[in-house]
Amino acid sequence: MGIDITIKIGGEAGQGIQTVGQLLAAACRSAGLYVFGINDFESRIRGGHSFYQLRIADRRVRAPYHRVHLLIAMDDTTLALHRGQVLPDGLCLLNSESTEAEGNVQPVAFGKLAREAGGDITANTVATSAAIALLGAAPELLEKILHRQFAGKSPKVLDDNLRAARLGAEAVKSTSFTYGFSWTMSDPVQRMLMEGSVSLSLGALAGDCRFAAFYPMSPATSIMMNLAGWQDSFPIVVEQAEDEIAAANMIVGASFAGVRSLTATSGGGFCLMTEAIGLAGITETPIVVMNAQRPGPATGLATRTAQADLRMVMHAGQDEFPRFVFAPGTPEEAYETTARAFDLADKYQVPALILVDQYFNDSLYVLDHDLQAPAAVRHHTVADAAMNNPADYLRYDMTASGISPRAVPCAGKARVMACGNEHKPDGHSTEAAELRNAMVEKRARKLQAMACDIRPPSVSHPDSKIRLICWGSTLGVVAEAVELLRRGGTDAGYVHFCDIWPFPGEASAKALAGAERIICVEQNSTAQFAGLLRQETGIAASQTVLKYDGRPFYPVEIVSAVMKAGGNP
Amino acid sequence: MKCPKDYDNTIENKWCPGCGNHGILSSIKDALSKLGLAPHEVLIVSGIGQAAKTPHYLNCNFFHGLHGRALPVATGAKAANHSLTILVNSGDGDCYGEGGNHFINAIRRNLDITLLVHDNKVYGLTKGQASPTSDLHMITRAQPHGVILEPFNPLAVALALKAGFVARGYAGDTEHLSMLIQEGVRHRGFSLIDIMQPCVSFNHVNTYEWYAQRVYDLAKDGHDLADYMAAMNKAREWGDRIPVGILFREESPSFTERIDGLKDGPLVSRTYDPARLQKLLAEF
């Protein structure tokens, strides 16, 4: 076994818990290590309890570990809540001015040392440095990160933090830690490090998104915050709307006027957007909408995770219209899928809906490969030059494919008339029965070609007896569960769905062929995907592993659920 | 030279005979032709209601969307292409009821569009319920004991939000209304024209006769367009005398002029640059 260490940092909101995790992750990444970080917090800005859990390994890790090697407790609550998770030979550092170690609890006066260094605010640097020192890394590693982190700040801020780092390392000088390891620093590979939400925002740029409107809602806000920060260097406008209804209608308007547009929200905000999604459907206006799921209904658990909006997103909006639904499982896939969603929405003039969740958005990943900017972005609109007679342009021309050439208003002589009422090919409203049928059928025809652009699920062990089905963000935990099961002699594999609608029916049947047991792993209480699979293919899952408490899965939970049902068939 | 006929089309008009909308429609055609705009150079955005049908009866580009949501659609379109000339046709229910929040925020953005609110003080398309601007005590089938809510005052609200162009027109005076629309389109920033419009089917209080006895032209009354407090007083004048005309006008940078990133040209004509994205990716 190589390196596989989990560090948990806990404290009150506002204590910079997340910063400790991010600094540690940055240090590990620069040493060529892999990390995976999860962020657990309450819906409050100060106080309460939050924690950051960072897994450090010398191989790719994409799931949280259920035990803790090093616990950094910025307050007593953290120690009380998480001590039980610490391995017997693990270590707890407790923010305390006491000098007496008690069992594996070592007091370190983070607060006092921080004040000594220059202020309470540097406590997280003290803690980070202590952790780095215990892990056996050279202090220069963190110093380099701090230089980068505080590059734009006043020299005092950097000096205070460097001093804090020195004090933190010194404080644990004589503390022994079983899980320290040797950091091989010779020319490590610098892999990309980012939160899931960042991969989505970058994917939007790769899809040539130029307008984004949003109303803040956890856990989707960060997607828009990233884009807002890039407005000075990219041709993109990010507008904070008065509500989600406005945000969704704004992107419909922007897209109608010719630019690729995005909104991101969570389930509650998505509910408010549904009418506009239908508007995009009937006006055949391409839009991309991200739903970062959290538990509901209504406000539910505002800062926690879920996969319970699949059915809502698939059916959002009254009546019927074609749409895409995607649920990427990794940041690499999220980047690529987001760019693809913009292209496909544009190509088919339909809404493309992307399902992620709090766990995906707020988790920190080291990437397998560097993300590449697409060399070019192909647009699917038409101009006057492509028309025989622009004056006769028909926005909803009846075509065999169902896709009518889409012109942009005021770009030429063609008048573009879009209508949310049922309409004639020219865009004027109609109540004629035969035209209504023709338009419904024209829109539905697009599904055939759309299905050809749908990718099959990814499969790990095609001939395995047990297939674990997952979709969206749970890929990492399910993949690790499969690894653990196989190591224990159970013949398991996974089938992961990113492209969900139009449903890849044939590909699913193929991916599941020969399986003796099919187990659906989902973060909802009714196995929504299992139902969809059965509806579309007739294939019934023999077991479901469901979790809906708002917390992410640990791989061992899935393993034990599979074993409890008998392991190998 | 453009003429109002350029804006005609052959779509069957579905408004009631005598509806105030007919006058508004002819004022729009007159104003657009006098502004020298060709049909393909104009975008009309509308929501739902009798007023929202307006673009169907005009030769132009249009987006006919959802009830109450015309302004957000117009906001997105303007952000995408700030060179567009956008008019929004809305009604008192669409704009001040269902879309009230958007009305407030479009003004706060100083979105450079011209908002025409066909204000007949009653719901026409749903057959006669009270609207946000219905007079107190007006009796309808939905409000059999009379309206008990204070009427919404769009002009005073717009002024309170520092709207730069606040006007009231009257569907019965198409020449005057055309002038207001031309001024509204020329105004850089948000322009509100609340248009008093008789509803011959459902509003038996605010009729053509009722308005004819009350309406007077602010321009002939020595009203100072730059006097904010005078404008606020005129916005509140309702009863025996009802002012029409421009209440207040003051230009300030519009929504899209306030966005730094748009100084390099409309978003719609910008290009994707892989090198720039690759540079950003390298930061991770």
Image (spheres, rainbow, N blue to C red):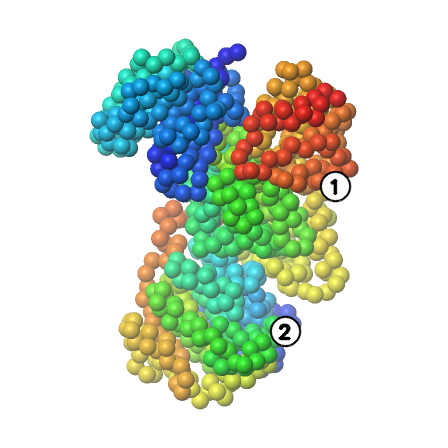
Q: Disc 2 to disc 1, how far (Cα)?
A: 44 Å
Specify the label residue A477 is tagged with: none
Is residue A469 shown above or below A252? Answer: above
For the image shown, how many numbered marks are present on the structure?
2
Q: Is residue A332 left or right of residue A350?
A: left
Res. B280 in view = no
Is residue A443 shown above or below B143? Answer: above
Q: Chain of mark 1?
A: A
Position of residue A335 measured from the top left corner of the image (x, y, whole percent): 53, 33
Residue type (three-letter) at the residue carrying disc 2: Lys
Q: Residue at x 37, y 30 (%)?
A: A76
Q: Chain of mark 2?
A: B
Q: Nearer the viewer, residue B205 or B84?
A: B205
Mark 1 element type: helix
Q: Residues within 10 Å of mark 2 (few under 14, many from 20)?
A: few
Specify the label residue B14 is tagged with: 2
Q: Is residue A323 left or right of residue A375?
A: right
Is residue A292 shown above or below B156? Answer: above
Q: Residue at x 70, y 65 (%)?
A: A431
Q: Residue A336 appears in which quarter of the rendering?
A: top right
Mark 2 element type: loop
Residue type (three-letter) at the residue carrying disc 1: Gln
Position of residue B149 measured from the top left corner of the image (x, y, whole percent): 47, 74
**Label pair 2/1, CB-CB below 8 angstroms:** no
Q: Residue A490 appears in which quarter of the rendering?
A: top right
Q: Residue at x 76, y 61 (%)?
A: A434
Q: Residue at x 74, y 38 (%)?
A: A534
Position of residue A37 measured from the top left corner of the image (x, y, whole percent): 46, 28
Q: Are marks 2 and 1 on the same chain?
A: no
Q: Residues within 10 Å of mark 1 (few under 14, many from 20)?
A: few
Q: Nearer the viewer, residue A387 or B207?
A: B207
Reading the image, the residue beneath label 1 is: A535
